Amino acid sequence: MAAMMQPQIILLKEGTDTSQGKAQLVSNINACMAVADVVRTTLGPRGMDKLIHDEKGNTTISNDGATIMKLLDIIHPAAKILVDIAKSQDSEVGDGTTTVVLLAGEFLKEAKPFIEDGVHPQNLIRSYRTASYLAIEKIKELATSIEGKSLEEKKGLLAKCAATTLSSKLIGGEKEFFASMVVDAVIAIGNGDRLNLIGIKKVPGGTMRDSFLVNGVAFKKTFSYAGFEQQPKKFVNPKILLLNVELELKSEKENAEIRLSDPSQYQSIVDAEWNIIYDKLDKCVKSGAKIVLSRLAIGDLATQYFADRDIFCAGRVTEEDLQRVAAATSGTVQTSVNNIIDEVLGSCEVFEERQVGNERFNIFSGCPSGQTATIVLRGGADQFIEEAERSLHDAIMIVRRALKNSTVVAGGGAIDMEISRYLRQHARTIAGKSQLFINAYAKALEVIPRQLCDNAGFDATDVLNKLRQKHALQSGEGALYGVDINTGGIADSFANFVWEPAVVKINAINAATEAACLVLSVDETVKNPKSESAQGDAAASAMGGRGRGGAAFRGRGRGMRRR
């Protein structure tokens, strides 16, 4: 009886997973495996897409691991770790987000039987860390440098990397077309770290092949007033004035009050307002600029004034576009129209307004600094263009990484198989339990080629056996062999130009191992129900006003009796 009366130490909310120790760890591993299973089928050129419908009614079609992970509302605390590593891989490298989640899931899956057999998680963690260190050293050894090549050769090699990334995306059918576009865009911005210097504009309609690259800046025609159509729409070598000033008549702020003793004075006040704006416009014209862009509104008076003097103007240009025009044309955004000197004006070779689909675009090309590029994307459905934009973002990141860390490795599961073989071989030299753990790590790496086969509908066992045999050759000639997606056999990935930057693989293995070790090191989850109920009370009091949550809602729909 006394035993029954003893209070429970940890008070957990009803329905909470109260497991500790081994059961808790296995539960976390299962949750992570379930998350990995969601993105498993999106890997590789034959990967399927996911259609995600959120509560606001927005539909997203994607096979980008990071996008899917962000959109899944995962509430399991351990599984959230996988979401974080997918996001970090996306921001750090841009591609390999599905790979990193799959690897982490597989490392945990291989660890599960050991945990169930009573192996201490710290032993596994130690071996996994050793294995990851060995794997990364091996990748660096196998990587091939693309440094020291001519620009044309380099462009070709970078296009191969971009095409490998794009092959697994929705726009994989046009990967060569987009790969060269991405490489040109990245080379255009040079060593600039600011990704926002590459603009991507989406115009529904047309086909993917109608997409084009502008070596400069392009943005949609902004809202315009009467007189806009009288302005010239094409200039050669114009000067460009960038403003953050309103060029329109505005009513006084703060309810300014003017007291007049004589009605004739009223006219002088009206005239003063007109003189101010005419003075501003006159200064813009005298600066010699042929194109005036402003982040704030340019009114109907100003539009007509500029049209009469053969000047093009656009108001309410977004901050991002204005900054890109400034970077491209070497201009400076002005917050006043007083004493505008030539140094602050930008210039470009050609400015024109061009019709793209049913939108009109202002296009600045042949810019002196050449530090920007804009990709105008065309396509059928909106979701399709959205996915194409995400795919191009991945490809742009990959090309930038390959330019900076100029080493590439063979893709198509080749590098994974080679590391797996190397680790198995290394494991034989170790006495003790860690031999088994490093073997398990090596086996987990085979998930990439296996999944590539499964997604393409090939016999994974058959292909993996061929790959193992090829990689086991003493001469080392099979080290570059991976899955051949087109025939269902194996092929030399390097010769087929299935390349990826070494940094993608290094980052993926690092992040996946860290995540797996983190999950393995947790043996108990404690939810604090106190804080949750406190939040609930706060929400109720906010809705019901001063804590009377019940009273405030009781009388909905019918009159309350008065006593």
Image (cartoon, helix red, strand yellow):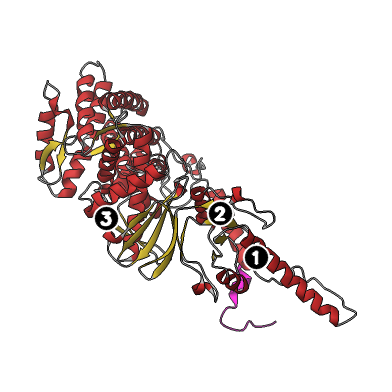
Q: Residue 127: percent from the left, percent from the top?
A: 32, 24
Q: Amino acid at mark 2?
A: Ser
**Number of the front mark, 1 or 3:** 1
**Number of the front mark, 2 or 3:** 3
Residue sitting at 68 percent across and 71 percent down? 249
* Closer to us: 341 or 29: 341
Q: Along the polypeptide, which appears first: circle 2 or circle 3?
A: 3
Residue occupied by mark 2? 533
The kind of secondary structure element at disc 1 is helix
**Residue 372 visible at all:** yes
Q: Along the polypeptide, which appears first: circle 1 or circle 3?
A: 3
Q: Is residue 58 above or below residue 200?
A: below
The residues tagged by marks 2 and 3 sit, at their Cα atoms, a distance apart of 45 Å
Q: Along the polypeptide, which appears first: circle 1 or circle 2?
A: 1
Q: Which residues are magenta?
A: 547-563
Residue occupied by mark 1? 281
Q: Residue 199: percent from the left, percent from the top?
A: 43, 53
Q: Residues within 10 Å of mark 1 (few under 14, many from 20)?
A: some
Mark number displayed over residue 192: none
Residue sitting at 37 percent across and 47 percent down? 185
* Closer to us: 134 or 562: 134
The residues tagged by marks 1 and 2 sit, at their Cα atoms, a distance apart of 62 Å
The answer to if 559 sits in the magenta stretch is yes
